[in-house]
Every structure is written in C-alpha cells, then in structure tokens.
Image (cartoon, rainbow, N blue to C red):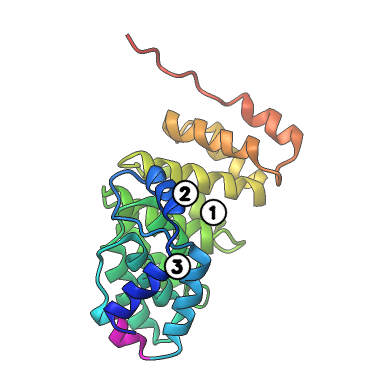
C-alpha cells in the first residue's frame, strides 16, 4: 500500500471521539486520527503478507497511527534477525509517546528465539538517558525476558537503571510489578533493598497492590515498603 492509500484507509476508519480520548492521554504526541489499535494490527498483518519493505521505506510519520502501523508491520513481517534489529532500531527513533513504545513491543516475538542477542542490543537503550529509549528497553524486558533464565538479570537491570523521566520511571515500576507477580521471592530483595528511587518504588507497590495476580498477604507486605512523599515547602 502506498502512503495515500494508508491515509485514505485511516480516514475511513477514524473515530473523532476516540481521537480526542487518545490525544488526552498523550499530550504533545503526533496528531491522532482516531483509528483503534485492533484495526491497525489487522492492517499491519495484511501489509506484512505483501511488499512490506517498500511500505516501510515509503511510510511517513505524519500521524500517531502511521507511526504505530510501522511498528506493527516491523513485528509482523518475516525477515532475517539482523534486518529485524535494524528495522526495530529505526522504529525506536520515532517513539515520542508511551503508546508508540508499549503496544508494538509485545509484537516483536522474534525476540524469544534470540534473547541473548537482544539482551545485548537493549543495554545501550537502558542507560541512554533518553526517556523513551529507556522505556522501550524496559518494556521489552517485561514483555520478553521475565523468564526463569533472565529474571535475575531483569531485576538487576531495574535496580541499576536511572530513569530519565516520568515515563521511564513508570516503565521500571511496571516491570517490577510484573516480576513480583511471577517471581515474588526473587523480587522481594529489590523492593526491600532501597535501590529504587522513591517515585519508582511507590508506583511499583501501587501496581502490585492493584494486581489480581498477587496474593493478599503479599500486598500487605509490599504496603509496608511505601515511602513517604516529600512535603513541598
């Protein structure tokens, strides 16, 4: 599909009220047309069956949906691992809001066959000091690396990273909560050890408390680790 065909498709599936809702969640993001994500995913799968390379080379970044579609196509198309890394790198440069980060990350399923290589690939992003690069790396960890083989490394990464902004901090909190739900005994030392900053610690605790996957007695325990908010003078 050429750029104008994509724009026509998006316009035909736009919902103005949904566009207003999404825009309210992501101030400062690209213009939102108002196409729901399942529609974009279905379109990405169709593009991935055809000449997806030409699509990615010609795609424009005018709207939120056009960029999101590129992320979905990158995850859906079959290609050699080295090309997948190059395409993913190109996509990460376009991320300027949390949704463009989070939604495509779970679709990069090729990672599960190349975890060691992708782990190494993610390290510069973790410590980049750029908020959405950090968020991308952390969301990739929670989506693909919370496993028996990698849980210790994921927890150490969560402790070591220094979030460069709100959206990076919230990603670390989310990752810690996912780790706790699946590996509570391994995650306890991180929460009790004082290695997370106050904002990340408290948000991780809130996410754990809100989780349906965590036992009530575990929730009671993590509540005791909340840190008081600093008073504003």
User: Residue 54 is drawn in which quadrant?
Assistant: bottom left
**Marks 1 and 2 in Cβ contact (< 8 Å):** yes
Looking at the image, which is closer to me, 30 or 181? 30
Residue named by callout 3? 13
| SS for callout 2 | helix
Where in the figure is residue 50, as x and y percent of width and height?
41, 91
User: Residue 139 is drawn in which quadrant?
Assistant: bottom left
Q: Is residue 60 above or below residue 32?
A: below
Specify few, some or many for label 2: CA neighbours under 10 Å numbering under 14, 14-19, or 20 or more.
few
Residue named by callout 1? 152
The span picked out in magenta is 51-56
| SS for callout 1 | helix
Specify few, some or many for label 1: CA neighbours under 10 Å numbering under 14, 14-19, or 20 or more.
some
Q: Is residue 16 above or below residue 70?
A: above
Measured in 3D between alpha carbons, the distance from the residue under mark 1 to the one under mark 3, in whole angstroms, is 44 Å
Residue named by callout 2? 156
Looking at the image, which is closer to me, 35 or 159? 35
Where in the figure is residue 80, as x and y percent of width and height?
39, 87
> Is 186 displayed left or right of 116 in the figure?
right
Q: Residue at x 42, y 83 (%)?
A: 47
Quadrant position of the C terminus in the picture: top left
Q: Residue at x 44, y 75 (%)?
A: 75
Quadrant position of the N terminus in the picture: bottom left
Where in the figure is residue 205, as x and y percent of width and height?
57, 34
The answer to whether residue 63 shows anywhere in this view is yes
User: What main secondary structure does the magenta stretch of the protein show?
Assistant: helix
Q: Which residue is drawn at 58% across and 26% down?
A: 225
> Is 64 displayed left or right of 181 in the figure?
left
Query: Is residue 147 inside the magenta stretch?
Result: no
User: Residue 212 is drawn in which quadrant?
Assistant: top right
Query: Disc 1 vs disc 3: which is toward the camera?
Result: 3
Query: Disc 2 vs disc 3: which is toward the camera?
Result: 3
């Amino acid at each position: 599909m050429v750029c104008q065909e994509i724009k026509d498709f998006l316009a035909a599936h736009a919902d103005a009220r949904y566009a207003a809702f999404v825009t309210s969640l992501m101030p400062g993001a690209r213009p939102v047309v108002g196409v729901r994500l399942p529609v974009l995913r279905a379109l990405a799968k169709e593009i991935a069956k055809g000449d997806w390379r030409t699509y990615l080379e010609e795609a424009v970044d005018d709207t939120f949906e056009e960029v999101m579609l590129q992320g979905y196509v990158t995850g859906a198309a079959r290609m050699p691992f080295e090309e997948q890394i190059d395409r993913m790198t190109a996509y990460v440069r376009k991320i300027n809001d949390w949704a463009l980060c989070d939604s495509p990350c779970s679709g990069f399923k090729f990672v599960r066959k190349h975890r060691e290589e992708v782990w190494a690939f993610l390290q510069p992003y973790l410590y980049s000091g750029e908020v959405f690069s950090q968020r991308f790396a952390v969301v990739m960890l929670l989506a693909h690396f919370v496993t028996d083989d990698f849980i210790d490394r994921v927890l150490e990464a969560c402790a070591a990273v220094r979030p460069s902004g709100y959206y990076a901090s919230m990603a670390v909190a989310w990752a810690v909560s996912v780790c706790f739900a699946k590996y509570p005994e391994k995650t306890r030392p991180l929460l009790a050890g004082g290695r997370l900053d106050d904002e990340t610690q408290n948000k991780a605790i809130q996410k754990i408390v809100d989780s349906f996957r965590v036992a009530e007695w575990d929730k009671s325990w993590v509540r005791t680790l909340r840190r008081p908010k600093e008073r504003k003078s």
